[in-house]
Image: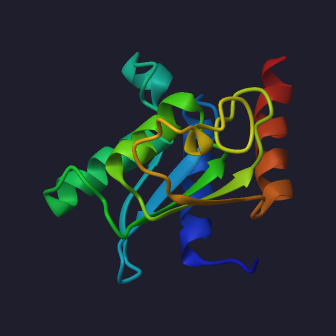
Amino acid sequence: MPASPYWDRAFAEAEAAAARGEVPVGAVVVAPGGAIIAAAGNRTEELADASAHAELLALRAAAAALGSPRLTGCDLYVTLEPCPMCAGAISHFRLRRVYFAAYDPKGGAVEHGARLFEQPTCLHRPEAYGGFHEQAAAAQLRRFFAVRR
């Protein structure tokens, strides 16, 4: 997939998170018309909040911008496969599509682990597509953790 302003912004948010000492994950919410309405990077350490994942922060900001708890018709671009918490939030926010870069066999919940969107009890099932710019996202994560291990 060629570069796009959505992926460029998601990766920039991930890089900014890394610069703050956060795991480099970035997320962008795109409105039905194609405008970016929210973007965020991880802030769990900064905010001392285990739920301050990039996806949740971006989803909350998008909901505030639209004045609605549902993001029907919106898409999410994120640099790492969402975890169970974020996948659950994605379902509740009722996103149309989720695009993610790197797969996360250990902590992911879309293509791995719980496969939340495939569960019969899942509230809403967005379309989900993974592997976009996967090598770039994986390299960003490797660089971050190499310094810390």
Q: Is residue 57 left or right of residue 64?
A: right
Task: Specify the color scheme.
Answer: rainbow
* Front residue of this view, candidates 115 and 30: 115
Q: Is residue 80 above or below residue 128?
A: above
Q: Residue at x 73, y 44 (%)?
A: 111
Q: Position of residue 59 (x, y in %)?
A: 36, 49
Residue farthest along the front direction in this orientation: 120
Q: Residue at x 85, y 17 (%)?
A: 149
How many labels sit on residues?
0
Q: Which one is nearer the viewer's eye here, 139 or 29?
A: 29
Residue drawn at (60%, 28%) of the image: 21
Give the x, y percent position of residue 17: 56, 40
Place of residue 127 in the rendered image (x, y in percent of width and height, measured from the top left): 56, 62
Tell me the quadrant of the picture where the N terminus can be found. bottom right
Residue drawn at (60%, 33%), measured in percent from left and top? 83
Q: Quadrant of residue 132?
A: bottom right
**Does residue 93 appear to the left or right of 77 in the view shown?**
left
x, y percent for residue 97: 51, 64
Seen from this angle, which residue lies furthest left?
Answer: 67
Q: Is residue 74 visible?
A: yes
Whether residue 42 is visible here, answered yes or no, is no
Q: Quadrant of residue 70?
A: bottom left
Q: Is residue 38 above or below residue 80?
A: below
Residue in front for this viewpoint, 15 or 132: 132
